[in-house]
Amino acid sequence: MTALRTDDVRALVRAGGMLLVAGIAARALDWIFSSRPILAVVIGAFFLDLWAQRIGARWMPGNPEASTARRLFAGMGTGLALGLFVVLLAAMLGAAHLSLTRASAASVGIGVLRTAAYAFRDELLFRGVPLALTRGHVPHAWSIAFSVALSVAPLVLSAGGVAPLALTASSAFLFATIWLRGAGGFAAWVIHVGWRIAVEVVAGGSGLEVTYLKGALPSTEGAEGLPAYLGTAAFALAAFVLYRRTK
């Protein structure tokens, strides 16, 4: 990793200060709308999106001919496949018991909208805005490391366990690499949505009834034990391959 210069450090400190204010504002929204947390997420995402557009976040670079619908289904399918692979592998290794269950259209629809909103807010706060603020000021590797550090900071401050920290860090590594060196923020967002739908909606009772015997994977932040480490390994491998291919 390239050594940081004095100007690089200043850029990171400046970006960190601005994002600290954004994080405090997000917490304030959570407190104000504590009875309706989805409102806090939507309002926060709205203002983060305005900020990201103003500073030129890398949302959908590359081939303008590519269909947005194609990118949407490809990315969401990738995230879904990744999440379901981890859940199924956990079951094969004896960490979970699976059974099929019915899923109502209403519960799936609400789950998809909720996960999409949370993923959008988190992608902008932890990847889109930080990477745009540091782009052109610090080497790519340091921008990605900065984004990963921001992603795990809430868990560190809340004294989260090792398993959710590892899973959050590895997923942040992949999503930041996609933002900066891959297909851009839209691709990272839809993959993130697909992952959350798989572990929070489908494996949360809308299609699969999952009883975890060793650890748990109700969400990235609430992951424990073997399922969390399987997810960590899957994200880390995907991120490493993408990072090496785009180096």
Image: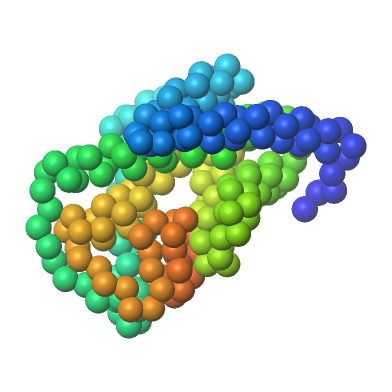
Q: 218 above or below 130? A: below
Q: 145 above or below 65? A: below
> Taking 241 as reference, is 149 left or right?
right
> Taking 106 as reference, is 197 left or right?
right
161 or 137, which is in the foreground? Answer: 161
Q: Would residue 225 be seen by someone viewing this image from the given angle?
A: yes
Residue depicted at x 26% and y 52%: 201
**Residue 226 picture quarter:** bottom left
* Extreme residue toward the bottom, this view: 94
51 or 135, which is in the foreground? Answer: 51
Residue depicted at x 22% and y 40%: 110
**Residue 13 picture quarter:** top right
> Taking 211 as reference, is 156 left or right?
right
Task: Where is residue 215? Give x, y as percent.
Answer: 41, 73
Residue depicted at x 63% and y 45%: 150
Task: Where is residue 208? Give x, y as percent.
Answer: 19, 63
Task: Where is residue 108? Give x, y as percent.
Answer: 19, 45
210 or 148, which is in the foreground? Answer: 210
> Taking 56 as reference, is 122 left or right?
left
Q: 99 above or below 235? A: below
Q: Would residue 241 be seen by someone viewing this image from the given angle?
A: no
Badge count: 0
Residue depicted at x 42% and y 40%: 119
* Extreme residue toward the right, this view: 6
Task: Where is residue 35? Give x, y as percent.
Answer: 35, 36
